Image (spheres, helix red, strand yellow):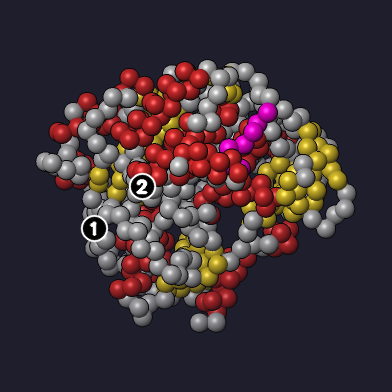
Amino acid sequence: MTKMLVALFLTFGLCFQLGAMPEPTLSLNQQTEDFAIFKKGLEEGHSGMYYFITKERFAQQCDSIQQTFREGLSEGDFYLKLRYLITLLSHGHTRIKLPYQGFVNYKMMALDSNKLFLPFKFRIIKNQLIVLEDCSKEQLIPRFSMVKSINDVSADQLIKRMRTYIPADGVNQSFKDYTLCNYFYLHHLFNLFYPDKKGVKIEIEKNKTHFYLELLRPKVIEKNYLAKNPKGISFYGPQLEYKTNQVQSVGTLRVGSFYKGLIEGKGQRYEPFLDSCFTDLQKKGIQNLILDVRSNEGGGDSYDRILFNYLGNLNPGKPVTYLPGTQFSTLPYAINLSDDVRMFVQNPREFLNENTLQLKQQYQDMMDPYSPQVLSNRFNGNIYVLTDGGSFSATTYLIGFLYKLRQTDPQRKILFIGEENGGDISSNTSCAGQSYTVKLPNSLIEVDMPILCFGELKKEYPKQRLPDFEVFPTSESLKQGKDAVMEFALKQIINY
């Protein structure tokens, strides 16, 4: 069985032959030691470890991977093997990273500042790789061009290959594509697949010319991007935006984040802003609300629940919180633990209900003290929710709440439009919040796993998944500066 798994693994390209790699390399003993800590750390610190994969299958995959270890394996190759296993768990909050040199900006955090990368900002739309900006020295590729191939590997094949290494919730794919482009993991993985490349050949759809471009360091890519754009790659604008059109009885509310620091860092205050918006909607008699939560990656402070309270008279309750276990033999390798997590791992039973892995109610209330309020300006009209692969984490909870609200009030129109959101509302659970992070002693690879899991797992997926209307932009609509998803939502309202 193990030999067959190894053969399948190699046959389907899940373990790439990277060829010659620069130092550092790892001895077989170092790989074996790190791998044992890696597996044990997941078992001890990951609250949803076996939600989407059986213990037996994961063990088989680990055995299969371990048989590919060899003396002098490159650090990058070893990392890819661990990253593949992480992805099998199907949890988007599970992360793994190599030790790297330098920091360019938040969005490009995965990129080692001393290595060479593809000089583009990309977007993936329906398996198509779109160039949002050519940041190369050569400046040959027009904006919104569709990439046909890179070094004779089709864009479609490259995207599918890379998805194998991007963690996401459940069966979700949209979050993988969002992460590949928005956080430059496509560039990160391409460098690992082809570490010796200093340039690439690019083919563009509907163009017979082959373009040859030099790969660049992240700081140069950022500099070239800024030279062509008034705002940097990692720029964040105001996260809360609101407007109305009384003629069409439409209000538009964009909530770009539930992260307090990002919102207040832009001079906005979340709760007063929402209250003023919903008071205005009521005053103007607006009957249709477009709620735009695209690229809202989540956050805390119960911001998702606060927003939902303005949208429906339904108390979804607080989900039960679970922890992974009570034994932490990997604690000597743990790093960057929050005070809460450190207190838990040192005395787990103090925090758990007797004979269970459920967090005691008193600690759950401390973690999430918010309770729905009676509101005089609650919105009772139609809601059109715009989502994409970046609608993740706490935003998944909001979408799940709205989906349940629609089931309790079928006369009210609540529609989901755009791309499948980045989380998994169907599983009724999410592993998120605090992290348990271990640093492997030889490779220095960091494995960051969610130590909290919220909700009771369900594995029965509906035949029809959200969104109700799958709408994607096209390269042409992007070129024209049009928002195809927003335009579709407006047409739904006008034709209603």
Q: Position of residue 402 (x, y in %)?
A: 37, 65
- Front residue of 136 and 487: 136
Viewer-nearest residue: 294 or 357 = 357
- Tally the numbered discs: 2
The answer to whether residue 124 is left or right of residue 216 is left
Q: Is residue 273 visible?
A: no
* Residue 181 shown left or right of residue 421 in the figure: right
Residue 191 is situated, as x and y percent measured from the top left of the image, at 66, 33
Is residue 388 visible in the rendered image? The answer is yes
For the view shown, which residue lies furthest in the right direction? 209
Identify the amino acid type marked 1: Gly
The magenta-colored residue range is 13-19
Residue nearest the observer in this picture, 182 or 308:
182
For mark 1, give the secondary structure.
loop
Residue wearing tag 1: 317
Classified by dominant secondary structure, the portion drawn in magenta counts as loop
Q: CA distance from mark 1 to mark 2?
A: 29 Å
Q: Residue at x 60, y 46 (%)?
A: 12
Identify whether 42 is placed above or below 360.
Answer: above
Query: Is residue 173 part of the magenta span, yes or no?
Result: no
Judge the density around disc 1: few (<14), some (14-19), many (≥20) Cα neighbours within 10 Å.
Answer: few
Residue 310 lies, with reference to residue 493, above or below; the image says: above
| 17 in the magenta segment | yes
Nearest to the observer: residue 257 or residue 82? 82
